[in-house]
Amino acid sequence: MSDKAKLRETAVSQQAAPRLLEWYDRLARVLPWRAPPGTPPMDPYRVWLSEIMLQQTTVAAVKSYFQRFTALWPTVQALAAADEAQVMAEWAGLGYYARARNLVACARRVAAAGGFPDRREGLAALPGIGPYTSAAIAAIAFDRPETVVDGNVERVVSRLFAVQTPLPAARRELTELASTLTPQTRPGDFAQAMMDLGATICTPRNPACAICPLMELCAARAQGIAPELPRRAPKAAKPLRTGTAWVALDDRALLLERRPARGLLGGTLAFPTTGWDGTDLAPPQDGPWEAAGEVRHVFTHFELRLSVLRAPLANPVRGEVVPRDGFDPNTLPGLMRKVWALAT
DNA sequence: AATGCGTGGGG
DNA sequence: TCCCCAAGCAT
């Protein structure tokens, strides 16, 4: 990099945080639901829980789940004592179920240790807590000057410095650039401000550069390429997979099955199915099976078409017989809710 | 390092 | 309808 470019980068790094925090404070006065500046940090349990839920998940989707979880389990000790099956049931529909399994494991470790570690390294050693979440908890709950890098920050930083390297290869470079922005004071507010900027102004499609607090500092804006950044490596096409789900029920009960702890929908309650990656599995009981239709579902890396078969419940050889009164389809993952809706 | 892992909303 | 993708982590 040229000396001139380096000087410019230094100037941007020094001016970005003050401008962003000024914008954030002004917003706090306008938006009544945001805590005003100077408010004491949120308690570590709630920060942790919300950050886990927000991994690859929108704020809108998380909201009701967070309310329910904190009402059911107000403290990490309460969550540590919870029945894992109930946690899985409450998580159902939110996706990425390894998060729920790790949530329980993490709560138990934290409760046993007497509380959350207050530094990034200690947090990152806990199950389900990686580079992003450890930095976020350290900055937001413990006021540590850690650099928080999520998808929003990657986008803001790639534009601010006009980084052309495609993601995910650019991640290391973006993290280093982001760390040059992080202030020693108010690191938690700064992290929140970067993410809020990415969510409201520096958006993926049509960034509102005209009202951006960092407009004068932004290299991509100067070059007119802000909407094109960050660049991304082309993604692979989604293969189509097929399988069968069996719904065995009468007016009193139905047949469900706990899926294996690892892998797709791991640990969730589901209708018995064949595999859908080549492996085959026999039906959980004798028929006659009647075709109820087909469910289509798109996962992260493949599309699934599931033939749904229905039969009267009769002497199942595997699974759990569950009484129909008290059965709530919302305790099933999204795919299985579709199966239930089709079969009934 | 690349791949596996959900779901729902917006353009 | 399609494509994009959202406050990532584990292996």
Image: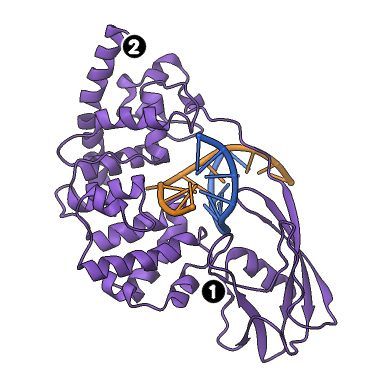
Chain colours: A purple, B blue, C orange
Question: Where's residue A341, x and y in %?
Answer: 68, 72
Kindly state the secondary structure of the residue where label 1 is placed.
helix
Q: Residue A324 versus residue A235: which sits nearer the camera?
A: A235
Q: Quadrant of the image for the N terminus of chain A?
A: top left
Query: Do marks 2 and 1 share a subunit?
Result: yes
Q: Which residue is located at x 76 percent, y 76 percent?
A: A283
Give the side of residue A338 with respect to residue A206, left or right.
Answer: right
Mark 1 neighbour density, 10 Å: few (under 14) some (14–19) many (20 or more): many
Is residue A184 placed above or below A291 in the rendered structure?
above
Q: Looking at numbered disc 1 in the image, what kind of residue is underneath it?
A: Thr
Foreground of the two, A68 or A131? A131
Residue A316 in picture, x, y percent from top left: 71, 85
Disc 2 packing (10 Å; few <14; some 14–19; many ≥20): few
Does A262 sit left or right of A222 as displayed? Answer: right
Query: Which quadrant holds residue A18?
Result: top left
Give the number of the mark in front: 2 or 1: 2
**Residue displayed at 56% across by 30% down:** A233
The image shows residue A162 at horizontal and vertical percentages of: 41, 20
Kindly identify which numbered label has been placed on residue A331. Answer: 1
Which residue is at a point 53% across and 67% down the rendered structure image? A261
Residue underneath mark 2:
A1
> What is the number of the mark on residue A50?
none
User: Mark 2 vs mark 1: which is more N-terminal?
Assistant: 2
Q: Is residue A34 above or below residue A287?
A: above
Q: Is residue A141 left or right of residue A275?
A: left
Relative placement, left or right, of A224 versus A343 is left
Image quadrant in which the C terminus of chain A is located = bottom right
- Residue A75: tell me if it is visible: no
Separation of marks 2 and 1 at Cα, in angstroms = 54 Å
For disc 1, the chain is A
